[in-house]
Amino acid sequence: MKKFKLLAIIFLLVNSTAFAQVYSDKVVGKKNASKIDSLKTAEYPYSLPIWGKKVTQMGYHLPYSAGISVNYFWQKSDIVIDNLYVGFNNGPQYNLDQIVRFNSAVASASSISIRPDVWVFPFLNVYGILGKVASSTDISAGIWVPDESNNWSEIYNFSTKADFSGTTFGIGMTPTIGVGGGWLALDINFAWSDLDGLTEPAQSFVFGPRMGKTFNFKKPDSSINVWVGAFRVDLNSETSGSLALSDLISGSDAQAKVDAGLVKVEEKQVAVDAWWNGLTPTQQANPVNAARYNTANNALETAGNFLTGIDGALSTLESSTVQYSLDKAPKDMWNFLVGSQYQYNKHFMIRAELGFLGTRTQFITGLQYRFGL
């Protein structure tokens, strides 16, 4: 079996928003005295944010109250898989945690999304997410079973790359505050990604604290913004679905690999039984020997059932299906962020951000247009 893509459906796209870093900034300093005075007497012409007029008269410089952005997001990360169940043609599903070992499981993804937002209060931005997702997962793993000496060895291995696509949507909010061009923002969002091969949309929760500084140019309302921060992602752990076996298995040697695996399982079972039957009743009553025997039997039985299920399904390859369920999580929940934004004026801004450290790397960029409501 050259391609066994079942385990490749473990990736959930983490949709991080690429919002522009705008905020309500408290204007301070003697050199800004004239600007502070003008804010105190200026008429605030928009309905939002709530208390916009009052906060402006307190000396805060507010961004336009609404915006829409187009964002591109790319990420690559290691993931951890457990509680893995697999079955064939709607038959019994077998837990493979004991016998499957992953050499690597790496997910990569990209998305294009549209994000409308509005400042409800001067220090709270609320936004929505709607986008298209493309993702792929590279997996290398093997089936391992023990012998009579409790030495585990690989009897079957596979590697695969699977591609998926779908849509993502979500909601989020960003509490933020700024004083003298320095600012703090706490981005929070919930997203649902509907990928092909999943029974239900997968969910994610993202928390992204950032702090930075804005440097103004001579041109009015033009500036450069730089920041550092962190990115934490939490996924719903349960994923389940059904796939066509013909999409998972290809290659003329598929049957031969399954047959060879079944032979190895039978050989090891014979050796384990011979070892156990060669023990005296006292030795069999030893908890260490009993545990070794039970562990070996459970692993060999699971491996045999799994390979037998594939063997039976191969006879009707074109009509056979595979059912699965599993729990998954990022190997590292946190990584570090650095970013920058160029604001041409209060209407247009472009932003880029890089996330790194740990086992996840990501890149976000976005173009935003803002206007008053």
Image (spheres, rainbow, N blue to C red):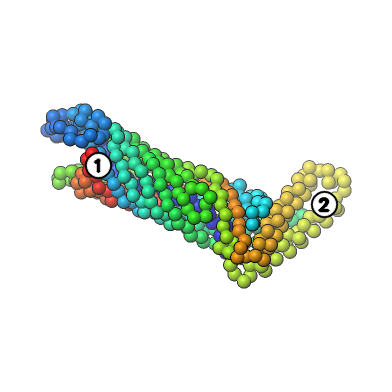
Q: Label 2 amino acid?
A: Trp
Which quadrant is the N terminus positioned in? Answer: bottom right
Say which label, 1 or 2, has the lower sequence index: 1
3 relative to 77, above or below: below
Image quarter of the C terminus:
top left
The vertical placement of 69 against 264, above or below, is above
Residue at x 40%, y 51% (from the top left corner): 362
* Residue 151 in view in this figure: no
User: Which amino acid type is marked by label 1?
Assistant: Thr
- The percent position of residue 193, horizontal first and vertical second, equals 45, 49
Left or right, residue 205 beside residue 114: right
Residue hosting label 1: 214
Residue 248, quarter of picture: bottom right
Q: Residue 276 shows which numbered tag?
A: 2
Mark 2 Cα shell of 10 Å, populated few (<14), some (14-19), many (≥20): some
* Image side of residue 286 versus residue 366, left or right: right
Q: Position of residue 184 (x, y in %)?
A: 32, 37
- Residue 12 visible in the current orientation: yes
Q: Nearer the viewer, residue 326 or 100?
A: 326
Asked if 60 appears above or below 150 in the picture, the reply is above
Residue 338 versus residue 54: which sits nearer the camera?
54
Q: Residue at x 15, y 32 (%)?
A: 43
